Amino acid sequence: MIIEWRKLGWSATAGALACVLGQPIAFAAVTEQEAAKLGTELTPVGAEKKANADGSIPEWTGGNMTAPAGWAPGQSRPDPYAAEKPLYSIDASNVEQYKDKLSAGQIALINGLKGYRMDVYPTHRDCGYPDVVYERTKANATMSKMAANGYDIAEATPSGIPFPIPQSGAEAIWNHKLHWVDSGRTETYATIFSQPGGGSFVPLVQNQWTYTPFGDPKAKSLADSGGIEYKLLNEVVSPAARVGELILIHYYLAKTNDAWLYFPGQRRVRRSPTFAYDNPVPGYENLLMVDQYPMYSGATDRYDFKLVGKQELYIPYNTYAFNDTSKKFKDIFGPDYPKRELIRYELHRVWKIEGTVKPGMRHLFPTRTFYLDEDTWMMVVEDLYDAQGKVWRAMESYPYSAWELPACVYQGYTSYDLNVGRYMADNMPQEGKVDWLAGRAGKIDPKKFDANEMRREGDR
């Protein structure tokens, strides 16, 4: 069941007329009275505090972001729920029974992939954030604004959720794009490409530096972010044929991405002319388009985003076992999908947003449906449709608690291409590592993300 969200409080016709007349319009956030619900009937980031009707989704009581005794950052992350057993499993034999709490893509995977199942565990609402995030989210509720075009963000205070009580689909999408993960991280991760016929795979392993200025508590205004959503610098460390390749990407708040590539054999940096929207990610075997990374990012101007409402959905959650850095790739990734017993699903409330390509625009995926976890605003499930209205690709991410921040985060995500019968798993931490505190510790130098530095980086 979808709970329809309230009608927008502005006139689209009047807004369009004002834009034509050249009047500077920014769509405002909520009233003081509505904002007062944050921390009372709503959580500090805008989720419903209360349990659902049958208690299968519990009340949020402040989260549980305390690290287990003896654990330290950099160590393999223990699973606090390792002793729990699945309540039930959803597979092709009983999918109809649960279809009202599944996305179309999830149903397509269950029905289309032999042996695919979702093991459902008790729901835990552990996610919480530092006080600064709560304080700035409360301020954003009444001051954040969308731009006159309806899809760019015009005003928001960094380190807070921009629109904790969203009034449009675009606002909700920005909550995902700017959900809090502090100011930067470093990681070594792998990308897995399944092979036709179940052949063996060779992981693409990369070192990555990520700069997220909007998450820096020292930033006081959107201008302090420098117009940046985030920046990435990736260095290939295996396989041997690609060692030393570099890619630098700038994701902006109000324009399309910039990207630069460095190939050791050429010993030169070249700018990528088409690193945006539905262009394929280089080296990803045509299994991922640029704005699918990670789940969804980049310019928002090609879609109209409709805020459909809230619903309950089975989503990956508390996925410590799957994200265990001590595990080996061969023990996790099968020919058609990752090992099902490693991925924990829970029932949570999510925001549902429908993205439809605007008239006069084009995109490989004319329609997309996004599902955002209400407790974190992270995108946990996404269905991407072809021109005939059939699910083409189905995606999911794998949230867990990074107690050291403290925040709930995800690195890895999986994209299944139902047309070609392959999947790819990206940003996978197994056999790798991640430092979520790198930005806070001064290990992320903004100067590193400069195209002029790439040649020097490659020549070292």
Image (cartoon, helix red, strand yellow):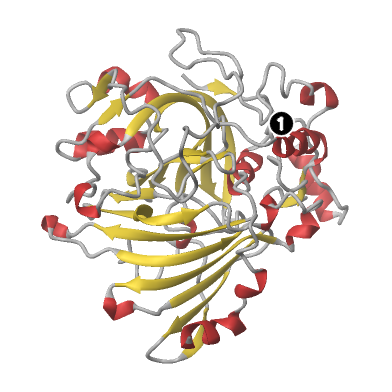
Instruction: Please tell me which residue is depicted at 53% across the width and 37% down the height of the picture.
Output: 353
Residue type at numbered disc 1 = Leu
Q: Is 245 on the left or on the right of 155, as rendered? A: left
- In the depicted view, which residue is nearer to us: 39 or 113? 39
Look at the picture and state if 289 lies above or below 87. Answer: below
Residue 23 point in image, percent of width and height: 88, 52
Q: How many marks?
A: 1
The residue that mark 1 highlights is 8
Farthest residue, direction front: 70
Instruction: Please tell me which residue is depicted at 82% across the width and 21% down the height of the picture.
Output: 33
Q: Residues within 10 Å of mark 1 (few under 14, many from 20)?
A: few
Instruction: Please tell me which residue is depicted at 48% across the width and 79% down the height of the picture.
Output: 261
Residue 221 point in image, percent of width and height: 81, 52
Look at the picture and state if 398 lies above or below 348. Answer: below
Residue 329 point in image, percent of width and height: 25, 53
Q: Name the quadrant containing residue 168.
A: top right
Q: Is 11 on the left or on the right of 42, as rendered? A: right
Farthest residue, direction top: 54
Look at the picture and state if 140 lies above or below 298. Answer: above
Residue 288 point in image, percent of width and height: 38, 59
Q: Is residue 288 at all visible to an observer of this figure? A: no
Q: Secondary structure at mark 1?
A: loop
Instruction: Please tell me which residue is depicted at 46% across the width and 59% down the height of the picture.
Output: 187
Q: Is residue 404 at all visible to an observer of this figure? A: yes
- In the depicted view, which residue is nearer to us: 21 or 383? 383
- In the depicted view, which residue is nearer to us: 67 or 48? 67
